[in-house]
Amino acid sequence: MAASSARAPHSSPSSVSSAARADAAQAPSRQNAHLLSIGQVLSLLQPEFADVSPSKLRFLEERGLVSPARTQSGYRKFSQGDVERLRLVLAMQRDCYLPLNVIKQYLFDVDAGLNPVMPGASIAGAPSMLNGARRYSRADLLRETRAGAALLNDAVSASLVAASETHGEEAVAVLKSLVELQKVGIEPRHLRGFRAAADREVGLIESALVPVVRRNSVSSRAAVAERAGEIAAQLEVVRTSLIRSALGRLAP
């Protein structure tokens, strides 16, 4: 796959413009661009993706998600377009739990000049699963969601929203939902079981990945995140089916 740049989305997947997708299909001009070492790329990405590592970047290159330039000595050199492409890939993995083959197909279609639907945008009006670059302060978060300070405090206490000085789009989506749930009498304290259930799912995923982790090689360590996302996606299918089935019994 040819090296190209894909701009990280700043809102929901459905809001990605055709112009942005066309920009993603343009190969960066490395002759004039300021190229970055792998260490410099990590310093740019780690504030948003704390677990990104050299082995992860090498793994993504091996899978054809990014194609950095090489010096005569064989060192990788990344353009700004490569960095933005990596940011998009990592966000789609982390926030959409998408396997790399799905992400790669999406980028392949963009590179080919097509106008593919962003994975995760199939449900109209659904909250974005892709965190944009925007960060919200506590005041910004309350203003954006029209939530009360007490509700946010309760959400943090129930581990539904992370305790942090700044928050991403996911926190906005969760707090907006909590505002609506509060209107029907459902408070954050009633949802503590959601955190416990999520922790149990993570435990299942960790158990399933033990054989891969024990290999203790660079490639196997890099593959853990991808496989974890695939398992999480399958668990999501089962969970959604069970909820829909239960709702069917409530309203036959």
Image (tube, rainbow, N blue to C red):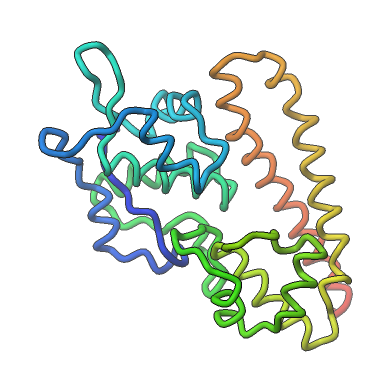
Position of the N terminus by quadrant: top left
The residue drawn where x is 11% and y is 38% is 32
Residue 109 vs 14, above or below: the answer is above
Q: Considering depth in this image, is 34 or 176 the residue closer to the camera?
A: 34
> Residue 77: x percent and y percent?
27, 27
Name the side, left or right, on which 188 lies relative to 26.
Answer: right
> Residue 90: x percent and y percent?
48, 43
Which quadrant of the structure image shows residue 103? top left
Residue 128 vs 62, above or below: the answer is below
Which quadrant of the structure image shows residue 138? bottom right
Residue 57 vs 9, above or below: the answer is above
The residue drawn where x is 41% and y is 23% is 62
Q: Considering depth in this image, is 29 or 134 the residue closer to the camera?
A: 134
Name the side, left or right, on which 233 lies relative to 154.
Answer: left
The residue drawn where x is 66% and y is 37% is 228
> Residue 56: x percent and y percent?
50, 29
Q: Considering depth in this image, is 212 or 104 the residue closer to the camera?
A: 212
Residue extending furthest top?
Answer: 73
> Residue 127: x percent and y percent?
57, 69
